[in-house]
Image (cartoon, rainbow, N blue to C red):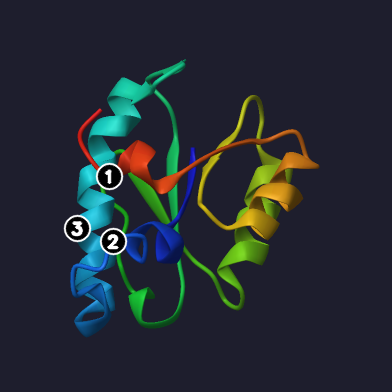
Amino acid sequence: MIVDGANVVGSVPDGWWRDRHGAAERLRDRLVAYAAEGLPGHPGPCEVVLVVEGAARGVESVPGVRVEAAAGSGDDRIVELAAAANGPCVVVTADRELRRRVGALGAESVGPRTVRGEP
């Protein structure tokens, strides 16, 4: 599972813009449960990769969630990761263009609500 950190964090107007780094850390911590449990229709365990960019760079990986800081565009890094995936790949984003790009590679896309709560 590859998570578009900026898109998922930005999907809820909860003040994330005041602390982008902290918002990315909170998302990372929520994602840990998905590494073990998986997503609906995709039972765990699974590898979870959170892609961050901008002010969220510097968020560190934790057991269960690998954090990838995009050097440039987060979307471009997500496409690279999806292209390199060994086996089924699910990308969590609401970005239509990103969904199109990863879909062309055979990846499935699900929306941010999929990971907003607990698995």
Q: Dot 3 lies on which element?
A: helix
Q: Nearer the viewer, mark 2 or mark 3?
A: 2
Comes first in the chain, label 1 or label 3: 3
Q: Earlier in the sequence, mark 2 or mark 1?
A: 2
Q: Amino acid at mark 2?
A: Val
> Height in image: 11 above or below 33?
below
Q: Is residue 45 above or below residue 71?
A: above
User: Residue 78 is drawn in which quadrant?
Assistant: bottom right
Residue hosting label 3:
26
Residue 116 is situated, as x and y percent measured from the top left of the image, at: 27, 44
* Distance between the alpha carbons at the discs numbered 1 and 3: 11 Å
Residue at screen point 36% across, 66% down: 10
| Residue, disc 1 | 116
* Left or right side of 99 for 62: left
Precedes in sequence: disc 2 or disc 3:
2
Can you give x and y, in whole percent of width and height, for residue 2 in the image?
Answer: 50, 45
> What type is the residue that disc 3 sits on?
Arg
Label 1 residue SS: loop
Q: Left or right: 69 with respect to 116?
A: right
Q: Nearer the viewer, residue 27 or 62?
A: 27
